Image (tube, coloured by chain):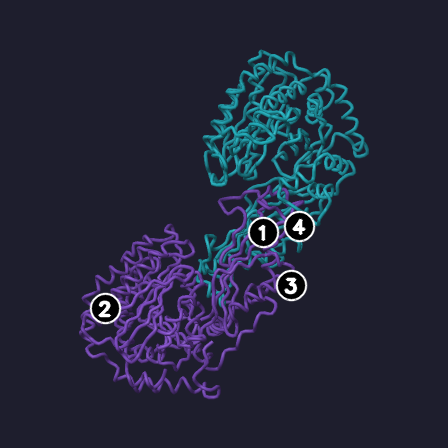
Chain colours: A purple, B cyan
Amino acid sequence: MRASAFGKGARRCALAAALAIATAGAAQAAPPDRAAIQAQVAQRHDSAVKALQDWIALPSIAAEDRNAKQGADYMARLARDAGFQHVEVVDTGGKPGVFATLDAGAPVTLGVYFMYDVKQFDPAEWSSPPLEGRLVDKPGLGKAIVGRGATNQKGPETAFLTALQAIRDAKQPMPVNLVLVAEGEEEIGSPNIARLVLRPDIQAALKKSIGVFMPMGLQAPDGSVTVNLGAKGVVELELVADGKAWGRGPASDVHSSLKAMVDSPAWRLVKALDTLVSDDGNTVAIDGFPKPAPLTAEQRAMIARSSAARDEATAKKTLGVSHWIDDLPWDKANERLVSQPTINIEGLVGGYTGAGGKTILPHRAVAKIDMRLVPPMTRDGVVAALKAHLAKRGYGDIAVNVSGGYDPTSTDANSRLVQAQLDVLRRAGVEPLLWPRLAGSYPGFVFTQSPLSLPSAHFGLGHGGGAHAPDEFYLIESTNPKVQGFDGAVMSYVDYLYELGRQDASSAAR
Amino acid sequence: MRASAFGKGARRCALAAALAIATAGAAQAAPPDRAAIQAQVAQRHDSAVKALQDWIALPSIAAEDRNAKQGADYMARLARDAGFQHVEVVDTGGKPGVFATLDAGAPVTLGVYFMYDVKQFDPAEWSSPPLEGRLVDKPGLGKAIVGRGATNQKGPETAFLTALQAIRDAKQPMPVNLVLVAEGEEEIGSPNIARLVLRPDIQAALKKSIGVFMPMGLQAPDGSVTVNLGAKGVVELELVADGKAWGRGPASDVHSSLKAMVDSPAWRLVKALDTLVSDDGNTVAIDGFPKPAPLTAEQRAMIARSSAARDEATAKKTLGVSHWIDDLPWDKANERLVSQPTINIEGLVGGYTGAGGKTILPHRAVAKIDMRLVPPMTRDGVVAALKAHLAKRGYGDIAVNVSGGYDPTSTDANSRLVQAQLDVLRRAGVEPLLWPRLAGSYPGFVFTQSPLSLPSAHFGLGHGGGAHAPDEFYLIESTNPKVQGFDGAVMSYVDYLYELGRQDASSAAR
């Protein structure tokens, strides 16, 4: 985890001081000719939307071994088209990555993290074809592109690339140099991200940057924006109970009547799973599992502010949830969301999974698990604890097959990367909410931890929804003036780049 | 359960006495012209095999709502072709049944139970197409038809129908009247069998019979035959944990990061399942579950004889099992098989079940369960105990969706239906093993319980394997003289019918 630039005693005052500095510098940060760039954005609108649709039509899905090379090549072409001078597809041992640099001769260099892969999808669950990127009316929001990857992450990424093209076409100076790393395995837990980012020349290029950001549509339907100061880590794994590994039960499925004389790997899985969580299923009960670091007063204050600003009833309705864990009130539920690790059953697969029943005693049963980690947990530490727990409880035969994951990420609110966001948002009339830690995960650890030790964050106006779900969308034309459509999202990147490129600010804080 | 024809004190001696009677009567039971019938069987061989293949090509699968009407109509046609004079497709409220009678003017009437449905199958798991019924060389056995339903139950049923045709074509007297009931829901637990069998006119027709038998290839690969004196009952059901029913957790799948503030129906299912069995997964731990009746000395003796005659190593190899439950020795494992009820996980289905992972918190998780019941358990009693257990443990929201099932079946070894089997087997040079109770299930309860209170059993020479599994087969041409192929199986039914038709025997015991 990245160490704070401030001493321990000073930390509590740092945020307030930083906010004051940022507000003072805000007036000087406009780009040379913002109107000219905005005109280019408007002119490019249709072709940019078309470019997003074309990209959606090429889904790269690592879990299904689908379109990895095609996706990386396509990503490389997008980078070239956006003005990156050096563009390279990188062998990572897994799905290829892309490394690209744009040298603007600027004093400031910015790292950019992209993913070109998307989550799996089942077209039967969608109301419009998931690879078509159809423009659909979303009541209360406006016109949105519906398609797999629309918001996670091709929409925001396309908006960012469009910003680069608009600056170039408006013949304005590119305010920062860019170092882009794009991976094709984000959705499987980025198992090879270090082999991309830490390749010596790529690491050296990123080391020159003030931090690494990922484009994201951060606006809620009411226009509010939450700036995340980190993210939970994650481990994705399968727990597999198998007759062969166990040395008991059948080696292949047998007739269920034999249960009276043959042991059952499926029951064994249930019994082992049972030991991993508290009776209510909500607290990790793995022996030796690290205690989560308690929230600081500053973090609790952020959560309280954000909880007050966000509508609990809307959140419950959106999620289809009538009670939070332990019937907690909204702010305490949010504290739990930020501060607690999780162990979640993503999927259960054993024996006969079709319609009706089938009288077999399965030889194998699998629980698909994801765990979310907070400091001081590490991916490797948690996997080791899980394995030790199973062994100690007599379930050492149950395989722990880790498919991906990484440590938590933390970025200081006082970093230039974050402060520039606050400036841009306020100029856009949005008073941002700070959030200590995203409950989801992204592989920011590879940037925030040694050897790079850089700030890392998401940024962008605009709105999307349905990540990982059916009918994923990204808003193109907004009917709510407080929420930006595609062109507004593009301009938020333009403004962010110019804000980061300001000489005075960039020398003041990194 | 059917009451024994003998008093309690007499029961211990009954079997030995019955065996003595049967042996004494054996010489008199040959049909009028067995050779003529056998010649017809040989002449019919190719067309009978073709008929079996044609039947296999029409799979009726209740769980998939596939070919129910077609299967019933086809079954009716097969009955007509075999000489049944009255044939009727019967509406049961579920998949249709078939009722047929053959009046031979004989003093003895025999009930026959058929199923025309088959188990689900996945062609990808088969080495030859499951609906083709291809003739395949089975090393060590001979030529076998491989196809879904080959042995369970179309092969033995075709052999029985062929026996009727051969007797007719040989112009020999039909020795018994027949009452046939055929159902299309055996593989989903016969939910409507009573609506077929107990329709007043069908019940009245069956009531005249000495008992009801089902054709089955009873021979093991070494030629030995086990005669079952009953079968376990069964309940098939799904346990469903669902956010809506629970009033906690999500109403549809949400992002897995929300596990930190949202309850999980999948964990709830695991916790509820955990309470249903002992730590080793082998003993039912449902509160108030009836204690199984202990084995009698006679039953233990049957199991000991059978265990000594059957090779444990072969059984282990066939099942892919290296240890029985609790590392029991062979005879004790067999005692457990016969005497103990089971609760088995057939399948686990929750959340994401595809390749790799998908970071969702599922709103629903399902365990597909089957339970096997021994006296004094009843299907309804066990379901009630399960529901009460879940409610008492605080899991009353977990749905118990029963799809089928029935009580255990018991038939007295001294019944004419069983004694005639022993006679025929001994004449064929096979010393049958008696087995107290099949660990599998069939809906014999509808015949053995009130109001019919009839004996019910399986019978037939011949051999098959792979019921419910890929590459199901039924032996057509045997290379082992101790194991009957198709024609031998047909002749075993011829001999059984004539044995049952013997006037002296039929009046002596019912």
Q: Is residue B31 visible?
A: yes
Residue type beneath disc 2 = Gln
What kind of element bears circle 3? helix
Q: Which mark is residue A392?
A: 3
Question: How far apart are the alpha carbons under marks 1 and 3?
Answer: 18 Å
Question: How far apart are the alpha carbons under marks 2 and 3?
Answer: 58 Å
- Where does residue B145 sit, x and y in percent of width and height? 53, 29
The chain letter under disc 2 is A
- Where does residue B114 sit, x and y in percent of width and height? 57, 29
What kind of element bears circle 2? helix
Nearest to the observer: residue A201 or residue A320: A201
Left or right: A336, with B216 as reference point: left
Question: How far apart are the alpha carbons under marks 4 and 1?
Answer: 16 Å
Residue at image coords 48%, 53%:
B353
Residue that mark 2 sits on:
A165
Residue type beneath disc 3 = Lys
Residue at image coords 25%, 70%:
A164
Q: Nearer the viewer, mark 2 or mark 4?
A: 2
Q: Are marks 4 and 3 in contact (CB under 8 Å)?
A: no
Q: Residues within 10 Å of mark 3 (few under 14, many from 20)?
A: few
The chain letter under disc 1 is A
Question: How far apart are the alpha carbons under marks 4 and 3?
Answer: 21 Å
Q: Which mark is residue B466?
A: none
Q: Compared with residue A239, is residue B87 higher up or lower down, i.e. above or below?
A: above
Nearest to the observer: residue A56 or residue B16: A56
Q: Compared with residue B38, is residue B464 higher up or lower down, i.e. above or below?
A: below
